[in-house]
Amino acid sequence: MLVQGWRLSELHCHPLSTESRIQWTTNFNSHALAWSESKSIVSTGFPCKAHHSEITNIKFKPSNIGSRNSLIQVGRNGSKKQAVRVVSSDVSSLSMKLDLLEAYDDDYDGVVVNPECLPPSANAFASMLCASLSHWKIKGKKGVWLKILDEQVDLVPIAIKEGFSYHHAEPGYVMLTFWIPDTPSMLPASPSHLIGVGGFVINEKREVLVVKEKKCPCRCSGIWKLPTGFINKSEEIFSGAIREVKEETGIDTSFLEMIAFRHAHLLAFEKSDLLFMCMLKPLSSDISIDDKEIAEAKWMPLDEFVGQSFYEDDQMSKKIIDICTATYENQYSGLTAHEMTSKMDGKSSYLYYKDLKEI
Amino acid sequence: MLVQGWRLSELHCHPLSTESRIQWTTNFNSHALAWSESKSIVSTGFPCKAHHSEITNIKFKPSNIGSRNSLIQVGRNGSKKQAVRVVSSDVSSLSMKLDLLEAYDDDYDGVVVNPECLPPSANAFASMLCASLSHWKIKGKKGVWLKILDEQVDLVPIAIKEGFSYHHAEPGYVMLTFWIPDTPSMLPASPSHLIGVGGFVINEKREVLVVKEKKCPCRCSGIWKLPTGFINKSEEIFSGAIREVKEETGIDTSFLEMIAFRHAHLLAFEKSDLLFMCMLKPLSSDISIDDKEIAEAKWMPLDEFVGQSFYEDDQMSKKIIDICTATYENQYSGLTAHEMTSKMDGKSSYLYYKDLKEI
């Protein structure tokens, strides 16, 4: 609802036993509101103040809004008042006129806005967002989740300027959040980690499957390395290791165990990653490289692989290769993956631990 | 550069040994371009076609642009041509006039736009973005990284409509990417995982440190559980476990080993999480709960904790508690954390593996 460029963003009534309230917010800092019937003001308590996104309650008796000539007058303090005609004088239908964003409650006293039902117009969205925030505040809601799809991108600046924060994003959408209470946000953080996998594949001739990467941004250009990569969305660690080895070298493998993992921070975009080293058993021997990523791949005698001078003063790589070798020689064992269900969330997932026979 | 609502988004020249080129893109599909000097067309090859974000090269000899009266004429095929006066006819200064976004090269043939130097005006940004994309394409660049801060949010719709995709976001900024080649994007995925930690703390009286959470959205309301939580940005797994136990219960601990981890998918926002169960040694005994998250905390006899009927038919929790108990009874051992440097990235990070003495 626009009054000479001022947005009266919410106007609704709650029928109470003996009196009702008009609750409203505006997007300017200070104003007066008057309720009149037949041009005579019947409610007291004006002028009043409301701050951006705050709610002012004006109590009045339902009998006060008995005619279609009822007016609500709004304006900045000290400036000319503007009259907004109340289309319906019936309290309940006045309340029905409210345009709120469609949302459902979550399990944490929060609301999740339905992205399918966002208005296409930026102006309508701005009014509805403002009205909805007031409504959710009244209802004692805490966190608000607002997912905005690519085709709705014009709504992003409106929400950010209204006080929303980015939570996370991926191709196709951005997720914004708003924490309503005057306390630190209790909303969960956004995903922080990429998950990498590496495969140690060794054959019966004591040869290791190694690759040279085409594009190596680090100081390891030209080094024969173990195949590594990142797991896909919702992929298991063991499946990711098998897939990466297959993609880079064409070799089929099966998962034996996860033998060690590295936790590194402040990598790309200041995020972290976990790299899980997996012992894999080769099921084929003919190499066929992925020439987008890999320059060369081959089976290399273990001693020659370990003996590369680069690894001699690379503490991390040396330790990982030592563990791989020890595992191959049955002097070390890592964790295996076991699928089981959890009553906590009713889901099936994998627990990685040392085989039961060793417990 | 706007010509009757059509954006001639780039216009620059590369001095070559014997000839130069005008390279330009438009935001409409088909058009004609003519180069004229003193109102006579001196270059051939018109009309020509360019598609949105594609580049058309017009070769001409530097001698052709010898006067300030040179004109470039652009227009849709079949529609009235519009003339854009070339302010300077000097090839090198024409090239200098180009307003490109400030960016630096990354290690993967990509560019990273400097967020500190984005123009505040949306119109200027639109032109510079379009010109920069053409420029980077000419230079053979592949991935473009564009970080937009909260205060620059009006630029987000422009970039998305230009073909950028969301990569990731967190409070304060959103990161967008653009893959220039006509091949599938090779850019790394956004962070996909939250990292959780759980602490198994058992004292000399065989009592386990347990909590009841205030807000439990799952089917485990009222159950005595092990303290759990998410690690902070750039926090180590063992530090996170110690911190969460301290925050929730007030108990000081030291890290012994990581004994098992669960990998679960399609949780909040369809993302995944890894929950690392850590064996911790208690260093204090007086409990002081965090009443924002925790309803109660206490030391509970191990048998009583294990005997809770909820866990009997919760396969995942039961297995985790079995592993914790076996570790306490020295019948199981997990992985310990070892800090070391990597020559690959020159960084220090933690490798989790079974203690060397066991190798």
Image (tube, coloured by chain):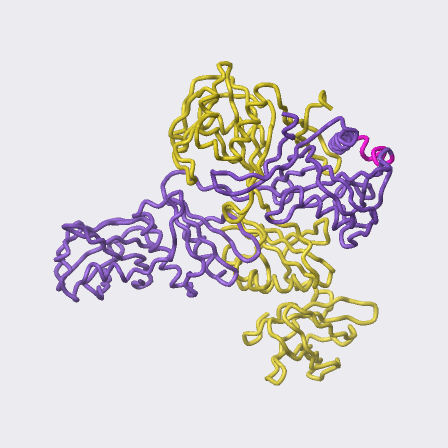
Chain colours: A yellow, B purple
Residue at x 52%, y 21% (from the top left corner) = A253
Using the rendered image of the protein, determine whether residue A231 is visible from the camera's viewpoint: no
Q: Quadrant of the N terminus of chain A?
A: bottom right
Q: Quadrant of the C terminus of chain A?
A: top right
Residue at x 76%, y 49% (from the top left corner) = B248
Does A187 appear above or below A182?
above
Query: Toward the viewer: A291 or A75?
Result: A291
Residue B12, position in %: x, y?
Answer: 25, 56
Residue at x 75%, y 80% (from the top left corner) = A43
Residue B275, position in %: x, y?
Answer: 67, 38
Relative to residue A237, is residue A106 drawn left or right?
Answer: right
Relative to residue A122, is residue B31 drawn left or right?
Answer: left
Relative to residue A308, is residue A253 drawn left or right?
Answer: right
In the rendered image, residue A215 lying in the magenta stretch gets the answer: no
Based on the displayed image, in which of its 4 quarters is residue B198 positioned?
Answer: top right
Does B106 appear above or below A38?
above
Query: Toward the viewer: A43 or A278?
Result: A278
Using the rendered image of the protein, determine whether residue A175 is visible from the camera's viewpoint: yes
The main secondary structure of the magenta stretch is helix
Residue A317, position in %: x, y?
Answer: 51, 33
Query: Toward the viewer: A331 or B34?
Result: A331
Based on the displayed image, in which of its 4 quarters is residue B327 positioned?
Answer: top right
Q: How many marks?
A: 0
Residue B159, position in %: x, y?
Answer: 43, 54
**Which residues are drawn in magenta?**
B304-314
Does B146 appear above or below B5?
above
Query: Toward the viewer: B36 or A131?
Result: B36
Does B9 appear above or below B332?
below
Residue at x 57%, y 50% (from the top left corner) = A168
